[in-house]
Image (spheres, rainbow, N blue to C red):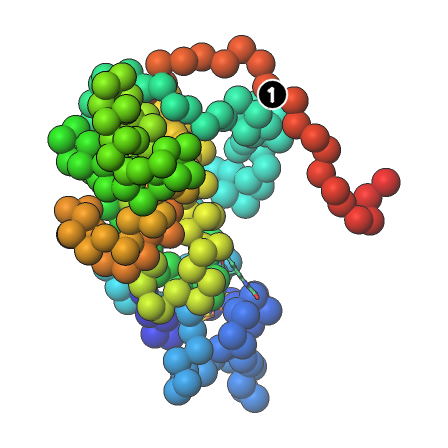
Amino acid sequence: MSVVGINYEKCSVCKKCITDCTRSLFKEDPSGKVIRLADEMNRCNFCGKCVAICKENAILWEGNWEDDVKSYPGVEEYEENVSYENLMQLLMAKRSVRQYKIKKIPQEVLKKVFEAMRYASSADNRRAWNFSVVSDPSIIKKISQASIKIVFRYIGFPSADAALKYFDSIDKDPIFHKAPALIFLTTGATGSMPLIDSGIVLTYGQLAAHTLGLATCWIGMAHGLGMNKEIMKVIGLEGQIHGALTIGYPAVKYLRTPPRAPLNVVGLE
Ligand SMILES: Cc1cc2nc3c(=O)[nH]c(=O)nc-3n(C[C@H](O)[C@H](O)[C@H](O)COP(=O)(O)O)c2cc1C
Ligand code: SF4
Ligand code: SF4
């Protein structure tokens, strides 16, 4: 997206774009007209807040995502869309799930998970994310075995061979828990705070997945796969893995929230 100017037939000079643009790219000129400054240093990070805040829809921008700009009842008072109580029920019920049904996730359901991730915050709005979905069981097994070869000591085996043999003998996948699909994430060189952004975007995906009856688990044990070029080719991404999730329909139900210690917060009584 690129902001290219202001539609003066619509602009009511409310000045909200001036106040809200974190890059100070709007100002009032001496004639009282609000203008967008030439962005010679490319400071605009395409956050789109000027588009989002303008009541008159007067911000002119170009890009391929015209359909993405939506206004809907409740967009201003968003706290009325999802109550704190409803959100808390989702957050408290969402567990990291390691037992999955042998059931394919329809593409349109997976797309909804990614749709939610589009709206994740990211440092400087860099959004330097690259994702891959793997759902072929034989490829998942191959990736799992490659992970076991990296983490065998961590999971309590003296050698990779011993670990592979053991899990084969009990038909268990200690890495991806026989999930029907995996989501991998790498971040491009343009990321400003890539590890944090990765955590945020996948958390959006996890929460969305749970509203769709799916379950997920973050797989830190797969992060080392970035060093295995052959496996990265199979995954279809380059660079370091900054996030990996299992995703599928849960084969387990939890009946209550687990006990969780209160947070350490300075400044709250
Ligand atoms: C890790 C991280 C660091 C951020 N740091 C800043 C910051 O220092 N100052 C700021 O104004 N916004 C900061 N942001 C907010 C982003 O600029 C913002 O998420 C992005 O522009 C997209 O806008 P949205 O969150 O409204 O969708 C940060 C976001 C993240 C995730
Ligand atoms: S927010 Fe919209 S209406 Fe208000 S000054 Fe900016 S362009 Fe004009
Ligand atoms: S997209 Fe964001 S940074 Fe760019 S002009 Fe609009 S508010 Fe400012």
Amino acid on which the number 1 mark rests in the picture? Pro
- According to the picture, the residue beneath numbered tag 1 turns out to be 258
Residue 159 lies, with reference to residue 53, above or below; the image says above
In the image, is 81 to the left or to the right of 63?
Answer: right
Q: Could you tell me residue 102's position as x and y percent?
A: 23, 17
Query: Residue 186: image x %, image y %?
Result: 31, 54
User: Can residue 68 be seen at all in this image of the molecule?
Assistant: no
Q: Is residue 189 above or below residue 165?
A: below
Q: Residue at x 35, y 24 (%)?
A: 214
Q: Using a 10 Å C-alpha cutoff, classify the residue at mark 1 as few (fewer than 14 neighbours), some (14 to 19) or many (20 or more).
A: few
Residue lying farthest to the right in this orientation: 269
Horizontal and vertical percent for residue 240?
Answer: 32, 57
Query: As drawn, is 121 to the left or to the right of 190?
Result: right
- SS assignment at label 1: loop
Residue beneath the point at 23% across and 27% down: 165
Q: Nearer the viewer, residue 248 or 107?
A: 248
